[in-house]
């Protein structure tokens, strides 16, 4: 049995905004070819994940290094 949904929201996550931009373009073009209406796209705020680790395995607590991962989001809303 087929179901008809009013709206579908696709959330795409990634660590590189250029890749997300190209995926948004690809999804919009694929939807256009399939006659699916893309009502809107938006980008929620990015999320930072910071970790502080010791440089040395055993001692020297004052020698630390900090790593950061950024997660970017893109939401694509499809209608009908």
Image (cartoon, rainbow, N blue to C red):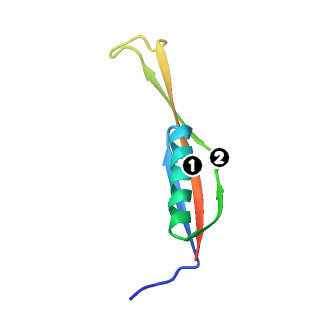
Report which residue position mark 1 lands on.
73
Most foreground residue, 24 or 70: 24
CA distance for labels 1 and 2: 7 Å
**Secondary structure type for disc 1:** strand
Count numbered badges in the picture.
2
Quarter of the image with the N terminus in it: bottom left
- Local packing at callout 2 (Cα closer than 10 Å; few below 14, some 14-19, many 20+) is few
Q: Residue furthest front?
A: 33
Q: Residue furthest bottom?
A: 1
Q: Position of residue 56 (x, y in %)?
A: 37, 13
Quarter of the image with the C terminus in it: bottom right
Q: Residue at x 46, y 84 (%)?
A: 3
Q: Is 40 drawn above or below residue 43 in the view shown?
A: below
Most foreground residue, 69 or 75: 75
Q: Earlier in the sequence, mark 1 or mark 2?
A: 2
Q: Is 30 drawn above or below residue 22 in the view shown?
A: below
| Picture quadrant of residue 48 | top right
Q: Position of residue 43 (x, y in %)?
A: 64, 50
Left or right position of 57 against 31: left
CB under 8 Å between discs 1 and 2: yes
Q: Residue at x 53, y 45 (%)?
A: 22
Q: Residue at x 57, y 45 (%)?
A: 21
Q: Is 54 drawn above or below residue 42 in the view shown?
A: above
**Secondary structure type for disc 2:** loop
Q: Residue at x 47, y 16 (%)?
A: 64
Please give the label number shown on residue 18.
none
Report which residue position mark 2 lands on.
45
Most foreground residue, 19 or 35: 35
């Amino acid at each position: 049995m087929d179901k008809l949904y009013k709206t579908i929201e696709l959330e795409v996550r990634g660590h590189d905004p250029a890749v997300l931009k190209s995926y948004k373009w690809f999804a919009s073009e694929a939807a256009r070819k399939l006659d699916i209406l893309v009502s809107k796209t938006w980008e929620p705020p990015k999320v930072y994940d910071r970790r502080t680790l010791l440089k040395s395995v055993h001692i020297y607590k004052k020698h630390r290094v900090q790593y950061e991962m950024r997660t970017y989001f893109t939401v694509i809303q499809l209608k009908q």
